[in-house]
Image (cartoon, rainbow, N blue to C red):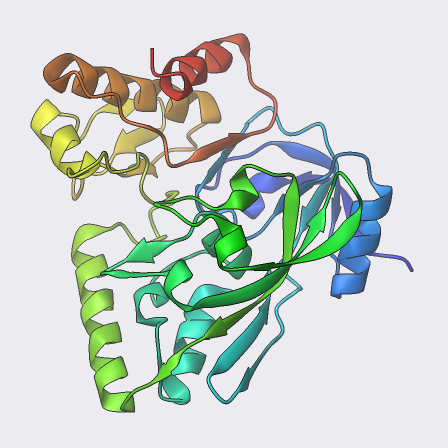
Amino acid sequence: MTCNYIENYELKNHTTFKIGGLAQRVFFPETIEQLCELLQTLHNPLVLGNCSNVLVSSKGVEQDVILTSKLNKFEVANNIISAQCGVKVPMLSKEAESHSLSGFEFMIGFPGSVGGAVVMNASAHSQSVSDTFKTCRVFDMETKKILELNKDEMKFGYRHSILQEKNYILLDVKFELRPLAKEEITAVMQRNLDFRKDRQPSLVLPNAGSIFKNPPNDSAGRLLEKAGVKGLKEGGAQVWLGHANFIVNVENATSKDVSLLMNKMYNMVKEKYTIKLVPEVKFIGIKSKEEEDLWDTMLNQK
């Protein structure tokens, strides 16, 4: 089985931050079988979805990259929605609405794909992926076998699942939603979209969503705003004026610009509140020595 790939692919073409250097080879599997074959044969590949909560190095990545954007099939049967890892979640949200099924209203404005949403147990407006999750299939990179996991085995928590602990790659997933009047679902989705429009930058301003996770019983945005980070700039990256927990790429920002700005935000909150925020955005690819140090500080809570 062969799979299409592109050599020397600029990853910034694919990230919502519009930041990212070259990958020597990027594969675009069109079936789950093709994806599994790539996972069997490539050495330590990097699997990416819609790249909406990642900062990809401007120096690029060393591994082969698999992009799941063509794994976008889904089906609805009764109250069950089955979806491949590359399906964009707003599409699933609309599909659930059209079948008068509730549980995906919160995902209507998300820029991500099913894979990323499950990995991080995406949530908003008192709904989360784990609420409707039933089962999923993953490829275990250690044993090179396909496993089926139920909800208990997923170890879901705030922005967490077992897929962050184990070397598992999500293949596809089943969700169980509940019937509800279509007008009620539509009204909630519209409220969520309005809320998002007021408080989050659209992708016209390239960004990667929330930069830091909320600490227990508090809001990262509130802490950052009180610490005075709004409008801070580093190279081509700037803290969005509309909400302090977003960085926007205003002028060909590099991964170093964003890393420096994040570090500045982290330190300002730490100095004012002695709270160490944890990055929600993941850094992917080749780190310069400076980026290594900046991320070491934030990830190891120094």
Image point 46% across, 73% down: which residue? 92
- Taking 30 as reference, is 270 left or right? left
The residue lying at 33 percent from left, 47 percent from top is: 205
Which of the image's four quarters has the C terminus?
Answer: top left
Residue 262: name its quadrant.
Answer: top left
Image vertical order of residue 252 relative to residue 127, above or below: above
Residue 289 lies, in percent from the top left, at 53, 8
Residue appearing at x 59%, y 62% in the figure = 136
Return the residue nearer the eye: 164 or 13.
Answer: 164
Left or right position of 181 against 153? left
Answer above or below: position of 91 versus 179.
above
Rendered location of residue 234, percent (x, y)? 31, 21
Q: Quadrant of residue 279?
A: top left
In this rendering, would 46 be left or right of 258? right
**Count of labels shown?**
0
Image quadrant holding the N terminus, namely: bottom right
* Residue 218 percent location from the top left of the image: 15, 37
Residue at image point 18% right, 52% down = 199
